[in-house]
Amino acid sequence: MTDMTDMAGTAKTLVLLDVAIEEFARRLRLVGPGDWRRPTPCTEWDVRALVDHVVGANVRYQLLLHGAPTDRVEATRSVDHLGDDALASFVATADRMVACFHEDGALDRVAHHVIGDRSGAELLSMRILDAAIHAWDLARAIGADETLPDDVVAFLLAYSLDLDLGPRQDTFATTSAGVSPDASPQDQLLHRLGRHPNTEEIR
């Protein structure tokens, strides 16, 4: 018998993926010719490298959901995914990735991620985290609106409570010190993921 509660939860999470993808696209549309070499909160990446990572991740998650071996997935990290039109590359790869998550049985599949085997449902949460947090990183880098949607923030606060990113922890910047109990939910999330939302350090 189908659990209607689980179905509703899955549908909501898939909607949050769409929202997170659009949050990144919204900032990417604002990137001008002089912005690509700006620094980002991910200190090893400038704006171009950050965007290339996110577009590349769209490709990696397609491979993961279709059972690609780890070495094939990881090989995409050395590829330039942006071409001549970063926005078009992002939109095209994001559309294909979202379609993969909607395939029958996709969330029950087991994928061979570099940090360990993950179900499709776990990959979905990971992708929402990556897209949303890097949307904030991009906004901070180019001086755009940094506000993330409340429902995405609430979901990621719950998801990241006991999150272990393994060897990819450094992808989410340097671990931050404790945050004030009076901080907004978004600031709590950002601090948890190594961001410093109340400073102007990279502008």
Image (spheres, grey):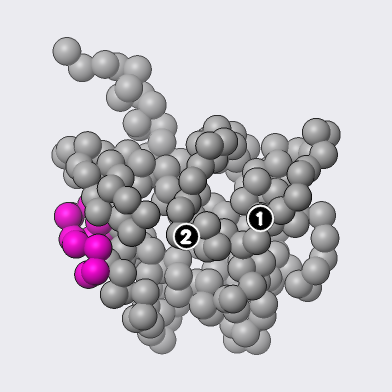
Q: What is the quadrant of residue 185 in the picture?
A: top right
Give the labeled residue for mark 2: 168
In this rendering, the answer to whether 9 lies above or below 31 is above
| Nearer the observer, 27 or 189 | 189
Name the kind of residue labelled 1 in the image: Thr
Residue 12: percent from left, percent from top: 41, 32
Give the labeled residue for mark 1: 175
Residue at image location 51% in from the left, 42% down from the top: 163
Look at the numbered discs 1 and 2 and tell me whether their residues touch, using CB distance below 8 Å.
no
| Nearer the observer, 199 or 112 | 112
Real-space Cα distance between discs 1 and 2? 12 Å
Q: Which residues are magenta?
A: 62-72
Judged by its main secondary structure, the magenta piece is helix
Residue 160: percent from left, percent from top: 54, 40
Q: What is the quadrant of residue 119 in the picture?
A: top left
Q: Is residue 67 left or right of residue 182?
A: left
Q: What is the quadrant of residue 82 in the picture?
A: bottom left
Instruction: Give the class, few, some or many, for how many residues have Cα within 10 Å of label 1's Cα (few <14, many ≥20).
Output: some
Name the kind of residue labelled 2 in the image: Arg
Furthest-top residue in this view? 1
- Tell me which label, 1 or 2, sits earlier in the chain: 2
In this rendering, the answer to whether 166 lies above or below 74 is above
Instruction: Give the class, few, some or many, for how many residues have Cα within 10 Å of label 2's Cα (few <14, many ≥20).
Output: few
Can see residue 92?
Answer: no
Residue 73: percent from left, percent from top: 27, 66
Please tell me whether mark 2 sits on a helix, a strand or a loop. Answer: helix
Please tell me whether mark 1 sits on a helix, a strand or a loop. Answer: loop
Q: Is residue 81 left or right of residue 138?
A: left
Residue 152: percent from left, percent from top: 55, 40
Residue at image location 22% in from the left, 70% down from the top: 72
